[in-house]
Amino acid sequence: MPTPGRHRRTVGASIPTGVPALYRLGLAVAHHAKLVLVLGAVFLIAAVAVGSRAFGELSSGGFDDPASQSSRANALSVEHFGAEPNLVMVVTAKDGTIDAPATAAAGQALTAQLAAESGVTIASSYFATPAPSLVSTDHRSAMVLAVIAGNQGEMVDRGGQLIDKYAGTHDGLTVRFGGPAGLYGDINAQVGKSLVIAESVAVPLTLILLLLVFGSIVAALLPLLIGGVAIAGTFAELAILGNLTNVSVFAINLTTALGLGLGIDYALLIVARFREQLLAGDDVPAAVARTVATAGRTIAFSAAAVGCALATLMVFPMFFLSSFGYAGIGVVVVAALGALFLTPAMLALLGPRVNAGRMPWKGTAQGSASQFWKRVAHTVFHKPWRTAAPVLAVLLVIASPILGISFSLPDQTVLPPSAQSRQVADLVQQQFPAQAHATIPVILAGPATSRTAAEYALALSKVPHVSAVAAPGMTAIAGSAGPADPAAGKLTADGWQRLMVLTDVDGGTDGARKVIEGLRAVHIDSGPGILVGGADATLADALSSIGRPLPLALGIIVLTTFVLLFLFTGSVLQPLRALVVNGLSLTAAVGIVTWIFQDGHLISLFGATARPMDASMTVLLLCITFGLSMDYEVFLSSRITEMFHGGKPLPDAVIDGTAHTGRIVTSAAALLAVSFFAFATSSVSMLQLFGFGAGMAVLIDATLIRGVLVPAAMRLLGSANFWAPRPLRAVYQKIGLSES
């Protein structure tokens, strides 16, 4: 196969035998560039048309496990007793108390209007049943608990219409809405705004960085165009997937950032290598072919590595995570195909004009080695312990906050204090203590008599921190029976029995989860068993459903990483080294966001509220950033492997490989970090956590990991860097994907 040289090389239409497949692909794209671009334009138009429906196809929530005990309990409760209230209306008197005759009359009229709305059922109201739990301690506010029929999407849509209609001031009353309908509606609205703001920040900054990197307008626009194709393909994919299954609304933001970032990363690598081949003396078809054979191979492996990391999300049962698995794979495929076909086709037509529109500066991606990274690699390679030890110490210190990490799921605190549902939740917690305490619905697992339900109620009432258990016809307190609670709601239907467990601990706390454990430990020999439901049980089950498959997900990542890097390098030690150093960048990034978003340091800069780490978003952060760290691992190791197998000694291969890829890796990381950091402008702290964490991870990986720890590790491994047992060497020689 042709090799780089100073003389000019040309490639005719005929392709010699024995040429690698990717080289052949590059020549084919170069010779049919116009056809490739026409097909690309057709794809782009179709993607835009289909992707315009993406927002309407995505779902809120998705943080619970459908197979968990709480999900089964909640489903049985809805089937036999009706849905739990999902819309909370808090009515506050502008003057006086809520019990004043005129104010109470206005509240009754407003409640009647809401109840008359299509698809709305009033479950409980202070104006209908003056229960103490439905009025604030200062008697200036009262609650109306309503049920909106339909699935979650219909609940959010109908809830939004009702909030727009009724929120505000009516006859001396201030009306605000919360509950699940209000919370998810606010999150959806904030996510949509965040996407617009993030893209309006990311795209101009990305273009500026691309101009700095390439030093020419034409070269800078090519990666941005591929990023745009990746975004359009992402939206089309989400629209199709959302029509077939549940896909989280957060997929819009996160996969768009990933599509833009990967599209630019891959196109950046292709364009930089093409310019390098032109400088080496290749004509345009030969430069395209050589670029696809080298940079294209790197992109194919990188896409496989990122895709495998994202595919592990499909082992989790909640669709918030699993939807990112198949959505993320699609994003990677679109970005890689755009870089492997559309970018070479455009380069084939542009040729040397890729450098048109020169800027006053030279740019950092000119195809030559970086003297800065060459000096860094030289110093690290010859003084590995002296240079790597301080970096390792810094990373371990940065990662240390994860020792105190705790987890939760999204609630009103992910929203800014200005959000209406956040204000309602805060008001309920402060002024409605009976509502703030965890109330846990328990349903008997099969049809039973009221007597059996009473036996369970008496047993459950003995669990620590349970203040009372409402059962059909009675209330159990500390193992003794008392009169029925008229505010308990419907507790028996069609032979099914339900209990309402009142506690003295706040909902969403560790105390509530301990009560859940105590309730689930209660058994009666003659009973059918119980299913514990409600928000706190859902939270406990969701955390368990994330923790249980996590070892499997990590095992899949380790196995696929090892196999891919072995096929890429022919070494068994390179994959192990990659796993260790990549893990360091991930733990450091998670440590940073834990220190900020959980421990509350510098959190005022984000306008967010300190809270436990979001469990689902942390898993998503780990999987995506691990895939991206593999992206840069492949960028660097491909060049080092290429030079080493080309005959260079290991020191020269490591130093020159780092010098040639240092600019590309750091430039790609900076561009990708911009896409992620743009989410710090979001008003949803989940997105801020992910965006800032992912941005820090790629920057740490591209600089401290690739620039220092990898060269140091390769120096310490020495001749063992490319070692493999004889049987595995035979496997690599047979199926390994080398360039020749």
Image (cartoon, rainbow, N blue to C red):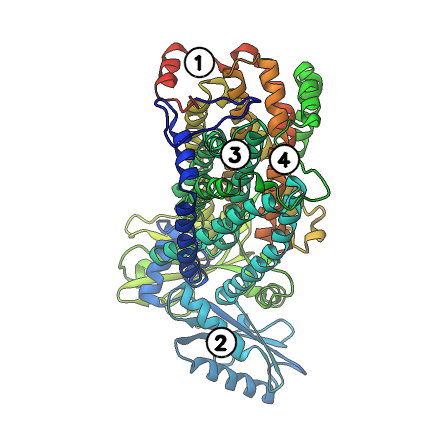
Residue at (51, 16) in percent of width and height = 646
Asked whether the residues under the numbered discs 4 and 2 touch, taking CB atoms below 8 Å apart as contact, a structural biologist would say no
Indicate the amino acid at tag 2: Leu
Query: Could you tell me how far apart the alpha carbons at marks 4 and 1 are, in whole angstroms?
Result: 34 Å
Q: Relative to 491, is 347 above or below?
A: above
Q: Position of residue 459 (x, y in %)?
A: 40, 53
Give the structural element (helix, strand or loop) at label 4: loop
Residue that label 1 marks: 724
Q: Residue at x 53, y 16 (%)?
A: 644
- Tell which circle, 4 or 1, labels the residue nearer the N-terminal end: 4
In-front residue for pair 131/230: 230
Q: Which numbered marker is on residue 162?
A: 2
Sequence-first disc among 4 and 2: 2
Quadrant housing residue 362: top right
Quarter that holds the C terminus: top left
Position of 737 with respect to 175 (left or right) is left
Instruction: Kindly check if marks 2 and 3 are in contact, taking CB atoms under 8 A apart as contact.
Output: no
- Where's residue 16, x and y in %? 36, 24
How many numbered badges does the structure rendering display?
4
Mark 3 — residue?
631
The residue to which callout 4 is attached is 365
Label 3: element kind: helix
